[in-house]
Amino acid sequence: MEAASGYPLGRALSCALRPASSRCSGSLALGGGCRAVAEVRVLVINTGGTIGMVKEDKGLAPEANKLVKALKKMPMLHDDEYVKEKKNSDFCEFPDDTLVLPLSKQNKRIVYTIHELVPLLDSSNMTAHDWAKIAMELEKYYEQYDGFVILHGTDTMAYTASALSFMCENLGKTIVLTGSQVPIYELRNDGRANLLGALLFAGQFVIPEVCLYFYHKLYRGNRVTKVDAGSFNAFSSPNLPPLANAEVDITINWETVWRANTKKKFKVHTQMNGNVGLLRIFPGINAAAVKAFLQPPMEGIVLETYGTGNAPNNREDLLEELRKATEREVVILNCTQCLRGSVTSDYETGQTLTATGVISGGDMTPEAALAKLSYILSKSHISWEQKKKMLSENLRGEMTVVPTGAKICLADSKFIQVIAKSLNVSCKEELEAIRDALTPSLACAAAKTGDTDALKAIEEMGGNLSCQDYDGRTPLHIASSEGNVQIVDYLLKHGATVHAKDRFGATPLMYAVKFRHEEVIKLLRKSGAHLSSQELKNIGTELCSLAAKDDVYGLYVWYLTGANMEQTGYDGRTPLQIAEIRGHVALLDFFKKKYKEENEQS
Ligand code: ASP
């Protein structure tokens, strides 16, 4: 089937492509909805922690059902006027517990909903069971929200962030953990600023990582550790600079952002292996205690060693216990006790330890190493050798792996050099600025012409293939509009995000539908692309109009996006009813086949 011409665009896109002056009062309307152009949805999962605690007789403890009410009274975290206006306007459903941030500098409205887990916990009480609860919540609501915030106690936040980074497989959206050192209900507190910052990042940027936001900084979740119990600046990411800084301006370090390089859909892995532990060596450590620690059911431990991964090599009793354990296939992952730095093979003491079968944990934090161990050991279908290999690989940006082989760098690009020369530019920062300014145009042009070599070169120069042009379009938007399956495939394999929205709120999937590129739609869907719940809800009139025109292919491409084909149009009829009334035989046949297929699948 090939695209028919003259297809009336989805209303979102037709609205988007009209001149700004004729647009519906800054709104991106889809089939009669009233979603503001830049309205984004964030789900906040409240697990507990100081941020929502109150002082009881026995000390600070979380209190249920209190946070939403309190936030509604905080103008920086809730704009009640906006909600009232929306409620009065025609079709909008805004459930009572909906919260909305004031309009952001980036001209976005962040609409957020809080789901409170039961019971709320001091994070000292959390276990892998609670991580699984959070992960399942993320999976359940993944398609309905643009981003996620997890409110969590600071004590074990680094453990949860590390664990979730592994449990969330093929992540394509932003997840931000945050909390505070002082409850949000107190006069002087860090909860308000932390929550606001986390919401702004989760709602406005596609940073497809499990992040942690605290005290003006966005960190990669599996790189942090809690370093201060008495300061608002409680976390540190010793071996990786922050992903973003929220100072006067928000600056994102896009080159550091981790991208999954996968075409698979998001899913969560909840079965972590609990037979893991942390063991910190110290001068004179007792070999019998080490032996006891390594006994079954223990399957893996993180050994916290000195400096660059050193342990005594004059303690045969200790080395013997470690050797015996690795021979029993207990995994021992070597991490440094130092806050900063990595395990290396610089010292004889370190090399003796490696000879016992211990694996280097590089520059992983003990929290990340423990989470990785627990994750990998829970994968029962892979061999012991494969597990050891995975532990040495960088799975989620948790460790620094020095790339082998020559790397083309910015200075190698003749093109950039010529421009730099004519602009009299010589320093690295300025070269990078030129690259960043040119990358979106170059990458979008390469996507348009199907030039994989150009995309490769841009990537090798350190350019980001999820970059957005002046209208917020990414190379994936362009390739999807063009229907170039090879380029779409290439971009997906190289970290392009399917969730990017251009300034009109349209995703690459929306463009693929608009230009009726069936294969691209299928590929994007396989990679987890979906229309937002709001868009899906409001396409009834569009579908009915296609049905009225007997446009079978037009309906078919919408069907491929996962749209609910039983939605009613403005007059309450479904596309099927319209096909029946008008006697569109081919269309009736399409619906019959669709129902048959669905019945067979269920
Ligand atoms: N004990 C608290 C917790 O981790 C500390 C905090 O949230 O800052 O839940």
Image: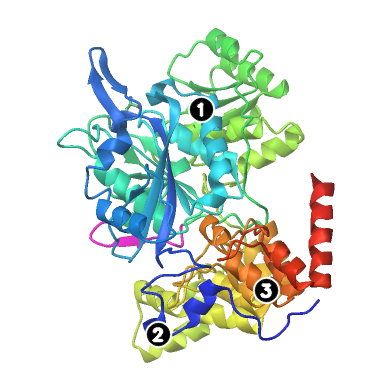
Q: Residue at x 70, y 78 (%)?
A: 549
Q: Secondary structure at mark 1?
A: helix
In the image, 596: left or right of 175? Answer: right
375 or 206: nearer the viewer: 206
Q: Please state the extent of the stretch shown in magenta in the rendering.
A: 247-256
Some atom of ligand 1 lies within 8 Å of the CB belonging to the residue at label 1: no
Quadrant (top left, top right, bottom left, bottom right) of the N terminus:
bottom right
| Mark 3 or mark 2, whichever is nearer to me | 3
Residue 592, position as x, y percentages in the image: 83, 59
Relative to 566, is 329 above or below? above
Q: Residue at x 57, y 67 (%)?
A: 407
Q: Amino acid at mark 1?
A: Asp
Question: Label 2 vs label 1: CA separation?
Answer: 52 Å
Q: Is residue 249 magenta?
A: yes
| Mark 2 or mark 1, whichever is nearer to me | 1
Predominant secondary structure, magenta span: loop
Q: Residues within 10 Å of mark 3 (few under 14, many from 20)?
A: many
Question: Which quadrant of the frame does ligand 1 lie within?
Answer: top left
> Can you tell which quarter of the image residue 154 is in?
top left
- Residue at the farthest left position: 187
Q: Would you name the residue on which mark 2 appears?
A: 420
Q: Would you name the residue on which mark 3 appears?
A: 546
Residue 226, position as x, y percentages in the image: 35, 34
Whether residue 258 is visible here, answered yes or no, is yes
